[in-house]
């Protein structure tokens, strides 16, 4: 960066920038990423899972789970001294991992310049301090490559993020949509296909559409299998079988992976190939696409007065226009969904591609998965906030539909065709296209038709607000699936 011309002495902008850059502490106000700054308070649960602390904690769990598996299978002589209580204690050490523990790992990493090796050395220290022998401590990381630990850690991280944070928020949004479907099940509303007046629906049915779509994509997201491997430097158990050839290492590895609630991938290079992470990202994107459509539709309905937003007394809509109540929650959600999807797209296309048996380009990318999930979390919470503020303006919605008698051109021409009256579509087109007609205009046309009395009466009884097909039933059925 070229410094500005000096003209203000020590008070120059450049001098102030230099002082700030070297002295300012990291806080929510000084964080570069809004997820850790402005929005940080909404993401406490995700920080526990997807931060570097979370990654370290899952690495510790992977290391100790492997040590415990080796002990249970009686693989290494030093581990034979461990009774069930001492093996279970390994799980307690992993569960009790603290910020002080994470800080110690960072201290060790400052020397090793290797993050996973720092975890190994930390655990050796910790085990000895906890009364385990040095021989037991020496068994930590036995026959492992760093990626055995890392891929398991990220699998545990993404499983926890899905099960503890993302999926519950998606479920809450589904519930909110189903409640709205029931609340407005019979509120007749003008449809707009291509932005133009179209056959009526109900507001509840439109919410039901989004509820059904989100439920389907959410289920797909929940069903993504989370895979892991624990098979050494190039995926062939080379070191394992050289050291202890009589052992069934694939079976031992499979038992470990299963004990962690994951599925084993038996065919890998040094890295688990991350295809499942791409599936995870793509499934999450499809959930986001449904919510993005919801945000834009609701935003549009607010703009034409179909919804009022409940007011918060001390909130400001515009810095200069006091009357405004802006749909900021849906706008915030739309923006965060866009950022999340941009990252998820990159993860899905980049992570499954690695040169030969591995390159390191996935490492820095994986460290950003929490960023994408943070923006998903922010978006899901924003949609919930916005949805909780909505009240339909039923009078406005009814008034918009009541005068649209031309919408009944569709049922009239369809009944005409069902009874073999030729040119029904064309006749209604002449009567209605490009203009609004009145009830009297339509009824005069219907009375002249050569139709059975029952069909004619049914058409004469139709109103724009009653021409709803099965919209009410479908909206109520969506709520019943809760």
Image (tube, rainbow, N blue to C red):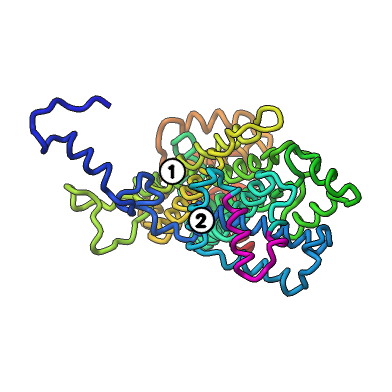
Q: State how far apart marks 2 and 1 are (Cα).
A: 36 Å
Spot occupied by residue 375 in the image (x, y as percentages of width and height): 46, 47
Residues in magenta, as a range:
118-137
Q: Secondary structure at mark 2?
A: helix
Q: Is residue 374 visible?
A: yes
Mark 2 or mark 1, whichever is nearer to me: 2
Residue sticking out furthest to the left: 8
Mark earlier in primary sequence (2, 1): 2
Q: What residue does disc 1 label?
A: 296
Q: Quadrant of the C terminus?
A: bottom right
Q: Tell me what residue is drawn at x 59 percent, y 53 percent.
A: 119
Specify whether residue 148 is painted magenta. no
Q: Tell me what residue is drawn at x 48 percent, y 44 percent.
A: 292
Question: Which mark, residue 53?
Answer: 2
Q: Is residue 471 visible?
A: no
Q: Are marks 2 and 1 in contact (CB under 8 Å)?
A: no
Q: Tell me what residue is drawn at x 62 percent, y 38 percent.
A: 416
């Amino acid at each position: 960066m070229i410094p500005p011309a000096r003209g203000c002495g020590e008070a120059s902008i450049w001098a102030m920038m230099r002082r700030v850059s070297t002295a300012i502490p990291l806080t929510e106000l000084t964080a570069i990423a809004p997820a850790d700054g402005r929005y940080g308070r909404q993401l406490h649960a995700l920080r526990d899972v997807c931060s570097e602390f979370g990654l370290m904690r899952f690495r510790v769990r992977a290391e100790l789970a492997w040590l415990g598996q080796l002990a249970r299978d009686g693989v290494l002589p030093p581990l034979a001294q461990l009774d069930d209580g001492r093996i279970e204690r390994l799980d307690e050490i992993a569960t009790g991992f603290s910020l002080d523990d994470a800080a110690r790992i960072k201290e060790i990493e400052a020397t090793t310049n290797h993050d996973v090796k720092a975890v190994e050395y930390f655990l050796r220290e910790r085990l000895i301090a906890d009364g385990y022998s040095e021989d037991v401590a020496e068994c930590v990381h036995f026959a492992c490559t760093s990626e055995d630990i890392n891929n398991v850690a990220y699998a545990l991280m993404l499983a926890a993020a899905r099960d503890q944070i993302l999926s519950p928020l998606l479920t809450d949004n589904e519930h909110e949509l189903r409640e709205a479907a029931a609340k407005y099940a019979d509120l007749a509303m003008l449809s707009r296909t291509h932005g133009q007046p179209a056959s009526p629906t109900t507001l509840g049915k439109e919410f039901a559409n989004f509820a059904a779509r989100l439920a389907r994509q959410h289920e797909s997201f929940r069903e993504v299998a989370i895979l892991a491997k624990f098979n050494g430097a190039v995926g062939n158990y080379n070191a394992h079988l050289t050291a202890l050839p009589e052992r069934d290492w694939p079976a031992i590895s499979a038992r470990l992976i299963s004990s962690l609630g994951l599925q084993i991938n038996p065919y890998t290079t040094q890295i688990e190939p991350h295809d499942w992470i791409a599936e995870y990202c793509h499934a999450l994107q499809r959930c986001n696409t449904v919510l993005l459509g919801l945000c834009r539709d609701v935003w549009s309905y607010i703009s034409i007065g179909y919804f009022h937003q409940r007011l918060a007394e001390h909130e400001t809509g515009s810095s200069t226009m006091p009357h405004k109540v802006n749909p900021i929650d849906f706008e915030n959600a739309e923006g965060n969904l866009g950022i999340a999807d941009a990252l998820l797209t990159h993860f899905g296309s980049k992570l499954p591609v690695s040169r030969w048996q591995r390159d390191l380009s996935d490492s820095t990318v994986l460290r950003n998965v929490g960023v994408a999930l943070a923006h998903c979390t922010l978006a899901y919470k924003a949609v919930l906030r916005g949805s909780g503020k909505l009240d339909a303006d039923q009078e406005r919605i009814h008034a918009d539909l009541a005068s649209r008698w031309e919408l009944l051109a569709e049922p009239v021409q369809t009944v005409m065709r069902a009874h073999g009256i030729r040119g029904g579509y064309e006749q209604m087109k002449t009567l209605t296209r490009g203009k609004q007609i009145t009830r009297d205009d339509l009824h005069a046309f219907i009375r002249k038709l050569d139709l059975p009395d029952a069909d004619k009466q049914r058409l004469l009884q139709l109103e724009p607000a009653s021409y709803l097909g099965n919209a009410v039933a479908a909206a109520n059925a969506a709520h019943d699936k809760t």
